[in-house]
Image (spheres, rainbow, N blue to C red):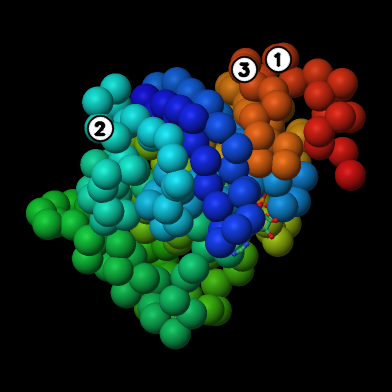
Amino acid sequence: MLQIKGLNQFYGGSHTLWDIDMQIRRGSRTCLMGRNGMGKTTLLRCVMGLVAARSGEIVFDGRTDLCKLSADQRAGLGIGFVPQGREIFSQLSVEENLRMGLIARRERPADALERVYQTFPVLKQMLRRRGGDLSGGQQQQLAIGRALLLQPSLLILDEPCEGIQPNIVHEIGDLLIRLNAELGLTVLIVEQKLPFARRVASDFCVLDKGRVVAGGAIAGLSEEIVRQHLTV
Ligand SMILES: Nc1ncnc2c1ncn2[C@@H]1O[C@H](COP(=O)(O)OP(=O)(O)OP(=O)(O)O)[C@@H](O)[C@H]1O
């Protein structure tokens, strides 16, 4: 579904991503892992068009080179993004936050919001609440709901469990498994917690100092890989 080929990225003179080759299989739940500062967020932001790649290709659905498209055009192709920190508008209501997700969309199916409420009944009960008054877990559901309004075929999430209580982390894991199974949504997620990755992911990819150093089916995430590239 998503093929990254020979991708290099620089912040000014600082070479951050080095010759990244990575495949996201359609229907997979891929966990992108790595210690802090290894380039995970930068790679997601390159895919979304929020930072520019210096060279390489990002092929979506076997045909479109995303590098030639704007961030809006990429979202329009069906790539949903839940950024690090969630980026909820704290002064706007839950409903207004959701409607922001529809602004980018030309046709706005009348049932788009209703579908999100079916997935997240708690949001329907909180429509008038301000985003800033929600708990971390509720804000994360709001951020995921907002991304789902565009009916993506690929959902990309950057550390969705950061700062969230363990029982809600478990629920988010269940939700991603359910969305993957029921909607056929392909999921690419940055997550550092090993138990979460082992429970939720079907595939993994490890970055170390801006390079891909390991990847494949999650069963292949060995203690040796963890020791060399993930433990601090
Ligand atoms: N806007 C920026 N300008 C310059 N350097 C940056 C910028 N954003 C990130 N970096 C640097 O690029 C490198 C990779 O950062 P990135 O945030 O992609 O890593 P990460 O693996 O997502 O880390 P974390 O787990 O801490 O979020 C780091 O050295 C970081 O300091």
Earlier along the polypeptide chain: callout 2 or callout 3?
A: 2
Ligand 1 within 8 Å, label 1 CB: no
Amino acid tagged 3 = Gly
Q: Residues within 10 Å of mark 3 (few under 14, many from 20)?
A: some
User: In the image, is residue 176 above or below residue 129?
Assistant: above
Q: Residue at x 81, y 18 (%)?
A: 222
Residue nearest the observer in this picture, 10 or 226: 10
Q: Residues within 10 Å of mark 2 (few under 14, many from 20)?
A: some
Residue 211 percent across, percent down from the top left: 66, 34
Q: Which mark is residue 64?
A: 2
- Left or right, residue 135 beside residue 109: right
Quadrant where the C terminus sits is top right
Amino acid tagged 1 = Ala
Residue 127 percent across, percent down from the top left: 37, 71
Amino acid tagged 2 = Thr
Cα distance between the residues tagged 2 and 3: 24 Å
Q: Residue furthest left?
A: 107
- Left or right, residue 189 beside residue 124: right
The residue where tag 3 is placed is 216
Say if mark 2 contacts mark 1, CB within 8 Å.
Answer: no
- Left or right, residue 89 beside residue 151: right
Residue nearest the observer in this picture, 79 or 127: 79
- Mark 3 or mark 1, which is nearer to you? 3
Residue 14 appears in the figure: yes
Cα distance between the residues tagged 3 and 1: 8 Å
Q: Residue furthest bottom?
A: 91
Cα distance between the residues tagged 2 and 1: 31 Å
Q: Which mark is residue 219?
A: 1
Ligand 1 within 8 Å, label 3 CB: no
